[in-house]
Amino acid sequence: MDKESARRMVLVLGLMAFWCNGDNYVAAPLIVEVTRDFHIGTSTAALMVTACMLPFGLFTLIFRPLADRYGKARVINLAAFGSAIFCGLGALATGIVSLSLIRPVSGAFAAAILPVTMSLIGDSFGREPKALQNALGQVLGLAFLGGAAGKGLKAGEKVIINPAGIEPGKAVKPVINTGGAKK
């Protein structure tokens, strides 16, 4: 892979990790707004976090063998597309029940992004230790930045007028082009 393709791949994968982590971290601060908008208790609203994170954790284990079998780039593309669709649907949730049915699917798709990205980067840069370390550092840095931004976006949620929170912004995330990687 040439240098420009590698740079583009790391950037796009890093942006995917940013959105994925941002979505994971924005849900909890929005519980107060969800309780108000859906007229429910805090513990009931907390179901939206659990509903997303349980499948996220479970499917993290499932996507590795799927990526080995069908290709890492293909699995990441499918995960990004599925996550974007279901995050967009989350913005249309009419209550905690619909939100708690949509978020698990979103979480399941998002589960592939970070671990399969790490594996794809390892495959792509494995023969060059310094390039591998730099690529992993850039992706993880963007993932952590996404987590911080997810919490920070809570302060600006008044700009987005929907009870499900930050979902519409995530729904526009691109389906990734992994820079020609054939993994």
Image (cartoon, helix red, strand yellow):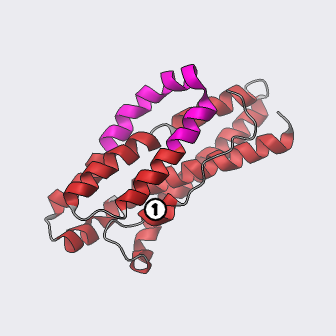
- Residue at 56% x, 56% y: name it: 173
- Of residues 4 and 177, the one drawn nearer to the viewer in this rendering: 177
Q: Quadrant of the C terminus?
A: top right
Residue that lies at the very extreme toward the bottom in this rendered image? 159
* Type of the residue with mark 1: Gly
Residue 139, horizontal then vertical, whole percent: 63, 45
- Residue at 64% x, 31% y: name it: 120
Q: Quadrant of residue 172?
A: bottom right
- Classify residue 95 as left or right of residue 8: left
User: Is residue 158 covered in magenta?
Assistant: no
Q: Which residues are magenta?
A: 52-79
Q: Quadrant of residue 6?
A: top right
- Residue at 49% x, 21% y: name it: 65
- Of residues 96 and 22, the one drawn nearer to the viewer in this rendering: 96
> In the image, is residue 130 above or below residue 174?
above
User: Is residue 64 covered in magenta?
Assistant: yes
> In the image, is residue 94 above or below residue 79?
below
Q: Quadrant of residue 137?
A: top right
- Residue at 49% x, 59% y: name it: 171
Residue 160, horizontal then vertical, whole percent: 42, 75
- Classify residue 21 as left or right of residue 136: left
Q: Quadrant of the N terminus?
A: top right
Element on which disc 1 rests: helix
Judging by the rendered image, the residue that carries numbered circle 1 is 150
Residue 56, horizontal then vertical, whole percent: 38, 40
- Of residues 101 and 155, the one drawn nearer to the viewer in this rendering: 101
**Main secondary structure along the magenta-highlighted residues:** helix
- Of residues 29 and 102, the one drawn nearer to the viewer in this rendering: 102
